Image: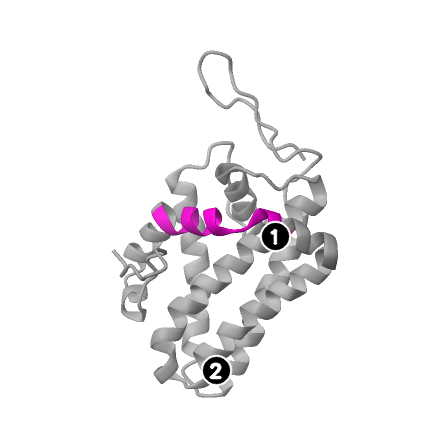
């Protein structure tokens, strides 16, 4: 399991990231839920109300760019510490932007984990049904790790890596805002009905 830090996220070291299976499993079983739980939904709502949706997306994109710059500025020397921090920050900003778009489109911000991850999955091109299984979360993690590994090689070059990392992160978060806006979200975030007496979800997100 990736090393557990003081913040409780348990994010991986650069060595752990080379073990894709271990990192993917940790994201799917632990990290996604921890990051989701720590997103301050009230703060996201207030920020969207104050800045507007586009302003908030740009704000989150700038925050994501910061760790992209830091992790690449010293090449391999800063990459070891910078990549795990960059992954955590990117996921946090991605989740904040996703919550912001859901709130802006529906007026809802008290969203359950399964409903939220369904939108996250769709926004990065992963098919998701009504129930969010570990298999779906694993595919989400795999997709995100592919993106992270593509950036890592480019950031081995000092200073140039900082420019690449910062720009890539900024554009990724901006792109997430657009992708979530196109995702399946309508008047109410929760479009699932529960079958009486069984607890089985029989509804679905509606276009």
Which residue position holds label 1? 43
Extreme top residue here? 197
Residue 188 is tagged as none
Label 2 crowd bin: few (<14), some (14–19), many (20+), radius 10 Å: many
Q: Residue at x 54, y 82 (%)?
A: 163
Q: Is residue 6 left or right of residue 33?
A: left
Q: Residue at x 64, y 63 (%)?
A: 174
Label 1 crowd bin: few (<14), some (14–19), many (20+), radius 10 Å: few
Looking at the image, residue 19 lies above or below residue 123: below
Looking at the image, residue 111 lies above or below residue 168: above
Q: Residue at x 38, y 52 (%)?
A: 31
Closer mark to the observer between disc 2 and disc 1: 1
In magenta stretch: residue 42? yes
Residue 161 is tagged as 2
The first of marks 2 and 1 along the sequence is 1
The reply to whether dot 2 and dot 1 touch (C-beta < 8 Å) is no
Looking at the image, residue 203 lies above or below residue 150: above
Quadrant of the drawing holding the N terminus: bottom left
Residues in magenta? 30-44
In magenta stretch: residue 100? no
Q: Quadrant of residue 187?
A: top right
Residue 85 pos. (x, y %): 41, 68
Cα separation, mark 2 vs mark 1, equals 32 Å
Quadrant of the drawing holding the C terminus: top right
């Amino acid at each position: 399991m990736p090393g557990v830090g003081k913040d409780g996220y348990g994010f991986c070291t650069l060595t752990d990231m080379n073990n894709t299976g271990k990192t993917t499993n940790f994201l799917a079983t632990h990290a996604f839920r921890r990051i989701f739980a720590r997103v301050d939904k009230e703060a996201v709502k207030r920020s969207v109300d104050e800045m507007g949706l586009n302003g908030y997306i740009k704000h989150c994109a700038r925050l994501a760019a910061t760790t992209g710059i830091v992790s690449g500025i010293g090449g391999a020397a800063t990459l070891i510490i910078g990549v795990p921090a960059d992954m955590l920050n990117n996921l946090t900003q991605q989740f904040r932007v996703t919550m912001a778009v859901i709130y802006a489109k529906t007026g809802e911000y008290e969203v359950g984990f399964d409903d939220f991850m369904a939108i996250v999955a769709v926004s990065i091109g992963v098919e998701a049904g009504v129930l969010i299984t570990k298999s779906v979360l694993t595919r989400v993690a795999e997709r995100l790790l592919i993106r992270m590994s593509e950036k890592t090689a480019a950031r081995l070059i000092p200073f140039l890596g900082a420019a690449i990392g910062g720009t890539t992160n900024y554009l990724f978060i901006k792109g997430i805002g657009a992708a979530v806006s196109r995702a399946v979200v309508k008047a109410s975030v929760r479009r699932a009905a529960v079958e009486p007496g069984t607890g089985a979800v029989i509804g679905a997100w509606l276009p």
